[in-house]
Image (spheres, rainbow, N blue to C red):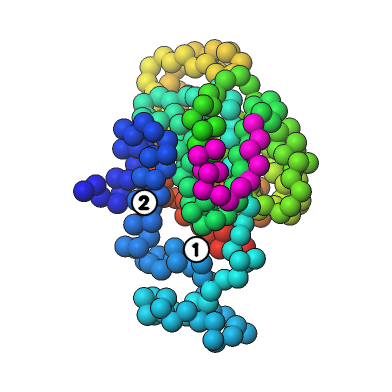
Amino acid sequence: MPSVESYLKPEVINQIKRLDLRAQFVVRGFLQGLHSSPYQGFSVEFSEHRKYTSGDDPSDIDWLVYAKTDKYYVKKFEAETNITGYLVMDLSESMAYTFEQELSKFDYAICLAASLAYMMIHQQDPVGLITFDEKIRDCLPPRSKRTQLANILSVLTKLEPSGQTDVASSLVQLAAMMKRSSLVMVFSDLLVDTEEVTRSLRQLRHGGHDVILFHILDEAEVSFPFNGLVELEDPESREKLTIDAASFRRDYEIQITEFREQYRQQCQQDGIDYVALDTSMPFDKALMEYLLSRRSRF
């Protein structure tokens, strides 16, 4: 029997070729991890319950949950539980990059999005899918029926990253499309102008939406494992640059740290959840961020 940790490793997930099984595998491992960790009882709170607070009717306490967790929970009303979510996928060619990892940035994002869709549908939350490159391409409206999961997975399975991207313009277009307060989950490597992207994210936030920004980089883009003379190529513009890795490494490490920190600080200022990921990381960090964001709405 695989350990809980193995369910969440990208190299293990890569051995499973069907996206629906990948999503089930990740979510199963994640939820098992919750039950065997200090977060025990956490998943109960997210699905149908919330903690009892002063002012609640004591008769609403669920004593079966109390018996399991030794904590007071009350049943949520349906209006409290439903959250509309949008999975927003960057289709740019740079997302196809991988150096030595089992999954490319795009594969990683697709698997993470599928897992979140699986969780949301399981909780009867409406979830939709948006894809973009230089503009919005696919738009699957949010639904909470079980058939929606198959619809989302069908689109995700067929996606291929190609061409250039305009993250900022696409997010502005998305903000104009959305008519009700939603949870917007953006999956991108964000290899574009930082200021324009944060401005468009701020517009989404000011429109009344909660936003989680999943910033996905390849492990090599974070750790810079290269040696000797290296030819680097921009996957979208095709511009090439030959560098000496040893003399370039320190400057690169400083720049990539500043790049991520800039997003983190700006998102924090704007009330946006920023999740820095690379393709070597288990999926539980990202799934936990979704659950924490969901809880904060109630």
Provide the residue designation for mark 2.
Answer: 28
The C terminus: image quadrant: bottom right
Residue placed furthest toward the right: 176
- What residue do we see at 56% from left, 63% from top? 295
- What residue do we see at 67% from left, 52% from top? 182
Up-down: is 203 above or below 252?
below
Quarter of the image where one finds residue 249: top left
> Is the residue marked by circle 2 packed among few (<14), some (14-19), or many (20+) residues within 10 Å?
some
Up-down: is 133 above or below 286?
above
Residue placed furthest toward the bottom: 58
- What label sits on residue 47 in the rendered view? 1
What amino acid is labelled 1 in the image? Ser
- What residue do we see at 58% from left, 28% from top? 91
> Dot 1 lies on which element?
helix
Q: Is residue 225 visible?
A: yes
- What residue do we see at 36% from left, 51% from top? 28
Camera-side residue of 63 and 290: 63
Where does residue 179 sit, x and y in percent of width and height? 76, 48
Where does residue 203 sit, x and y in percent of width and height? 75, 46
Of the image marks 2 and 1, the number of the one nearer the N terminus: 2
Number of labels in the image equals 2
- The reply to whether discs 2 and 1 touch (Cβ–Cβ < 8 Å) is no
In magenta segment, residue 145? yes
Where does residue 20 sit, x and y in percent of width and height? 42, 39
Could you tell whether 239 is left or right of 3 in the image?
right
Could you tell whether 25 is left or right of 149 in the image?
left
Structural distance between the alpha carbons of marks 2 and 1:
15 Å
Q: Is residue 222 visible?
A: no
Where does residue 219 sit, x and y in percent of width and height? 42, 33
Highlighted magenta segment, given as a residue range: 138-151
What amino acid is labelled 2 in the image? Arg
> Is the residue marked by circle 1 packed among few (<14), some (14-19), or many (20+) residues within 10 Å?
many
